[in-house]
Image (cartoon, rainbow, N blue to C red):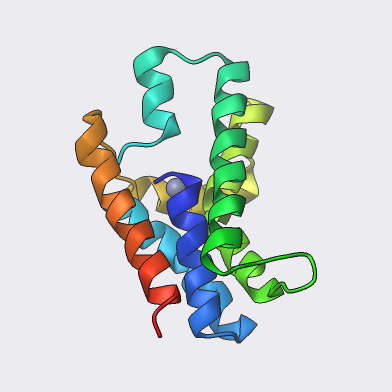
């Protein structure tokens, strides 16, 4: 899934269970669970449209920027009122994809990360059908936004 979905899920877990020893493993596990849902993401778009490395970095930067904005909006985060657990949860929610980029930039997989790459591959299901791959992510982020602001 895109970072927006992974980051908001990690942040949501940290908001609900604000104990690092609980939300860090759960946010990390959520990444694999979400990637199991057939989805469209920047990696799929890169294959379809033959993105250059610069285009790939640009799209990833947009994805991360929107992730930060979504967390700031959903949980009303400001510089004077911010919850570090949300950002740590978000970070662990996207960590497997960050680790995957080392493979991309160094042109060879880091041996120490092989088990994580393998796990990521096993759980990863994507689709080239844009809407079928995007709608579940819109539903997920909308549900998180509603649940986070319930009451
Ligand atoms: Zn992933």
The x, y position of residue 13, in whole percent, is 48, 75
From the viewer's perspective, is residue 112 above or below residue 105? below
Q: Return the residue nearer the eye: 2 or 145.
A: 145
Task: Quarter of the image for the C terminus: give it.
Answer: bottom left
Image vertical order of residue 151 relative to residue 107, above or below? below
Residue 38 seen in the figure? no
Front residue of 102 and 150: 150
Figure quadrant of residue 24: bottom right
- The image shows residue 9 at horizontal and vertical percentages of 45, 64
In the depicted view, which residue is nearer to us: 20 or 119? Answer: 20
Q: Is residue 80 above or below residue 52?
A: below
* Number of marks: 0
Q: Which residue occupies 50% across, 47% down?
A: 3
Which residue is outermost to the front? 151
Q: Residue at x 54, y 79 (%)?
A: 15
Horizontal side, residue 137 vs residue 120: left or right: left
Residue 76 is situated, as x and y percent measured from the top left of the image, at 60, 68
Report which quarter residue 132 is drawn in.
Answer: top left
Residue that appears at 73% across and 74% down: 81
Q: Position of residue 145 (x, y in %)?
A: 41, 65
Quarter residue 149 falls in: bottom left
Q: Is residue 106 visible?
A: yes
Q: Is residue 128 left or right of residue 23?
A: left
């Amino acid at each position: 899934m895109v970072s927006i979905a992974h980051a908001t899920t990690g942040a949501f877990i940290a908001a609900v269970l604000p104990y690092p020893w609980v939300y860090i493993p759960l946010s990390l596990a959520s990444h694999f669970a979400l990637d199991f849902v057939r989805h469209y993401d920047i990696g799929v778009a890169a294959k379809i449209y033959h993105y250059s490395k610069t285009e790939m970095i640009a799209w990833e930067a947009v994805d991360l920027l929107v992730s930060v904005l979504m967390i700031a909006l959903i949980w009303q985060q400001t510089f004077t009122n911010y919850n570090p657990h949300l950002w740590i949860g978000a970070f662990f929610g996207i960590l497997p994809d960050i680790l995957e980029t080392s493979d991309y930039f160094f042109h060879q997989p880091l041996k120490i990360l092989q088990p994580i790459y393998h796990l990521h591959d096993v759980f990863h299901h994507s689709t080239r059908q844009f809407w079928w791959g995007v709608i579940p992510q819109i539903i997920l982020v909308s549900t998180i936004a509603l649940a986070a602001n319930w009451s």
